[in-house]
Image (tube, rainbow, N blue to C red):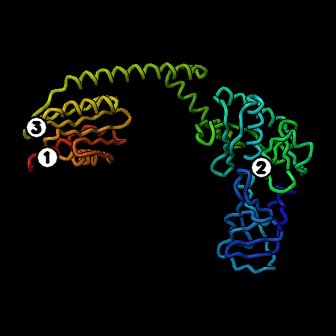
Amino acid sequence: MTRLLYETDPYLRKFDATVVKLQGEWVVLDRSAFFPGGGGQDHDIGWMGGLEVRSAKSQAGEVFHQVPGNSFAVGDRLDCEIDWERRYDLMRGHTGEHLLFAMLSRLSPDIELVKIAITPAKKSLMVRGQLNWQLAVQVQEQANEAIAAQLPVSDVWVSKESELIASVRIKVDRIHGDKVRIVSIGELDKAACAGVHIQNTRELKMLLVTKLTSARPVGDYEIEFETGRQAMQTALRLSSIGLQAAETVRAQPEQLLSALTNLKGELQMAQDALRSYGRQALARLEPEKAQGVRLYSGIFESLDKKTLVDSANDFVKEDRTVAILASVDERLMLIVATSKDLDLDSREVLNDGLKVVEGKGGGGKNFASGGSNQAQKAKEALEAAKASLINRLAVA
């Protein structure tokens, strides 16, 4: 069994320990301050005997440390050091997650915590239940009040049969053994947790929700957040962006959302008008002659795929007819259709058109479609497809 030093002193950065087992590049010590990961919190890294510790994991009561290239022997006494900056970031993130969910569950009692991720790259929790930015703002206000209140963060071990368990956030099926570690944030929250935490909410300095996204099918929402100086810097950056955006749309910052909603409505009306004009232009499209076939071609703004496909299929109902049609908005959509009497492969013509815009597509001999992110090169793609058609007709 490895003596877990982080349980009694989560701020311990350096320690010495004896090697008790070796399995290739994995090293087991008699005691360790390296957190092996768990409860959503990432494992520690650092140094051991002057070598890099790249990972840590727990197995059967022992902590295994991954130390590539080591030549340690059982009985060696080693100086060890945690990557403290990384560890402290994870500690704050884990306590921040507890505080964030505690405030969220107070405002929305039916919400359910599904999963958490506390890593150097991302701090997040996934939940089931109703959530929006208005609620997220309230949650942050209360969380930051708790940070300002400098509440103590403490832990205690109890048995699974303890009366305290009734007042704790816990999933008993995930608890191994007879003992449960309860982490408390003042009187605000009590949760079963094996992770490593800070000792006072003041160490968080600030908590900021940075993103709400769908977490389906795992949960309903994923809430990403930041703490400390990083949260302050992000808040300043996002505030600056918001103020510049308000200035750009000539609105007061408090009215930015309303102004953007109005602009979105106007944009939708403009797009609807473009689609209407596109349908009208498509309906009036006249064919040109190309190597003895009728060729319908053109570029249309914001036309939906169904309209373009239906029109192309209608055009090629006549013998000796080809349709090369494109629609552009944020992406380019290109369609090639040929009448069944022609000895042409629509896929070949399509691919020649999409090559110039690094697009992809597919289909059958008489109908093919594809797209590209390079909508600004729609004319080049259309012309390349038409040139390919004419060349293939010329040698047919």
Q: Residues within 10 Å of mark 1 (few under 14, many from 20)?
A: some
Res 173 label: 2
Alpha carbon separation for disc pair 3 and 2: 72 Å
Instruction: Kindly identify the amino acid type of the residue bearing the numbered disc 2.
Output: Asp
Q: Earlier in the sequence, mark 2 or mark 1?
A: 2
Residue 351 x, y percent position in the rendering: 26, 48
Q: Earlier in the sequence, mark 3 or mark 2?
A: 2
Res 293 label: 3
Q: Secondary structure at mark 2?
A: helix
Identify the residue at horizontal 76%, vertical 51% (top origin): 174
Q: Is residue 16 above or below residue 278?
A: below
304 left or right, relative to 60: left
Q: Quadrant of the N terminus?
A: bottom right
Instruction: Kindly identify the amino acid type of the residue bearing the numbered disc 3.
Output: Val
Question: Would you identify the image quadrant in which residue 43 lies?
Answer: bottom right
Front-lying residue, 245 or 103: 103
Identify the residue at horizontal 88%, vertical 36% (top origin): 187
**Residue sitting farthest toward the left:** 292
Question: Would you identify the image quadrant in which residue 253 lies?
Answer: top right
Q: Nearer the viewer, mark 3 or mark 2?
A: 2
Pointer 1 residue: 343
Q: Residues within 10 Å of mark 3 (few under 14, many from 20)?
A: some
Instruction: Kindly identify the amino acid type of the residue bearing the numbered disc 1.
Output: Asp
